[in-house]
Image: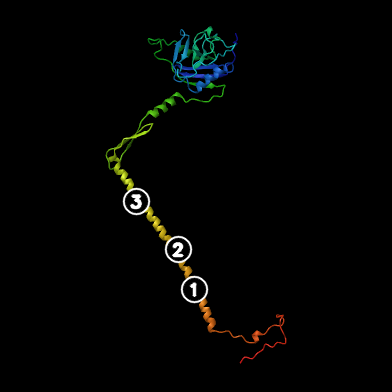
Amino acid sequence: MTSLEPETTAKVRIVTSKGPIDIDIWAREIPTTSQLFLQNCVDGKYDGRKFNITYNNNVIVAGSIDKESESTYDLEDEFHSRIRSNSKFMLCPIKEDSEVKNHQSLESFMITTEIIPSFTRRYNIFGKITGDSVYTIRKIRDDDVVDENGEPLYPVVIERIEVVEGYFELERKVEPKEKAKESGSEKKRKRVVQLSYEEEEESVQVKMRAQGRSEDIDEEQIKEPVEEEVHIEEAEKEEAEKEEEEKETEKEKETEKEHVPEEEEEEEESGSESESDSDAESHPIHVSASQLTRDRQLDSDYDSNLDLTSDEE
């Protein structure tokens, strides 16, 4: 006999303390419910939940509903004509009242251990248990060690849920619960820092809190270290001032050296000019008439009748 159920398009594995549970999901036929369930698995929403047995031991539920959630029962009905509750080990969301339409929720989920025909067209059946995982479901159901309220003394815990085939594009939107708890515990922790000095035998404890700091230190314990720091700062300032003064004196010496050569050059130039003038006065220049003879070819104003010769005795 062939099954009329459509082929599944997504798959997850629930890792529990009793063993793995493989679930095939009709993501194409029941898209809204399937995508929300897969996103919750990626976000680690169901990690750490304990399975409870309800409905005359025919249904196991993954933990309780998160009462702080704003959208507890906001999932609408989503049925398919070829997906029916005509076999065991079917996956579906929880519902506040099975007789009321819509108002389903994936704050938790449940798995049937028997055939329950009344679930058809009342719950959004969107997955089924496959393979040897049915034996894990039976182990959870047959755990008869319960307390006075009928709850198991050693409940099966969901360690994590692995999305094997997602069908949709999924990204983690919420931090895992373990990381959130660790970050919260780190904020509440108080850090204690111990400061010790060589001259003092007592240690100073500084308590740093998450919101604000409270430092419980006596003035006498920190007085000497603070004074030492002040003296060190003053000595550093004095050294810096001395270095600046030395630099200024060096600059002044360099400028004086530059001016001295210029004055010597001016004195030398003035001395050479005075010597040349004295030489000219002591040795007069004599020019003969022959040296004053004008060239006829070169001088255009030459007059042949002019007699320039003269005797010098």
Whichever of callouts 3 and 1 sits on the residue coming sooner in the sequence is 3
Tag count: 3
Type of the residue with mark 1: Glu
The residue at which mark 2 appears reads as 255
**Cα distance, mark 2 to mark 1?**
21 Å
Locate the C terminus by quadrant: bottom right
Type of the residue with mark 3: Ala
Locate the N terminus by quadrant: top right
The residue at which mark 3 appears reads as 235
Pick the front one: 128 or 52: 52
Residue 268 numbered tag: 1
Type of the residue with mark 2: Thr
Q: Position of residue 22 (x, y in %)?
A: 51, 17
Q: Is residue 313 left or right of residue 173?
A: right
Whichever of callouts 3 and 2 sits on the residue coming sooner in the sequence is 3
Pick the front one: 30 or 307: 307
Q: Position of residue 41 (x, y in %)?
A: 50, 21
Evaluate whether residue 162 shows in this view. Answer: no
Mark 3 and mark 2 in contact? Answer it, CB < 8 Å: no
Q: Residues within 10 Å of mark 3 (few under 14, many from 20)?
A: few
Q: Is residue 21 left or right of residue 304?
A: left
**Cα distance, mark 3 to mark 1?**
51 Å
Whichever of callouts 2 and 1 sits on the residue coming sooner in the sequence is 2
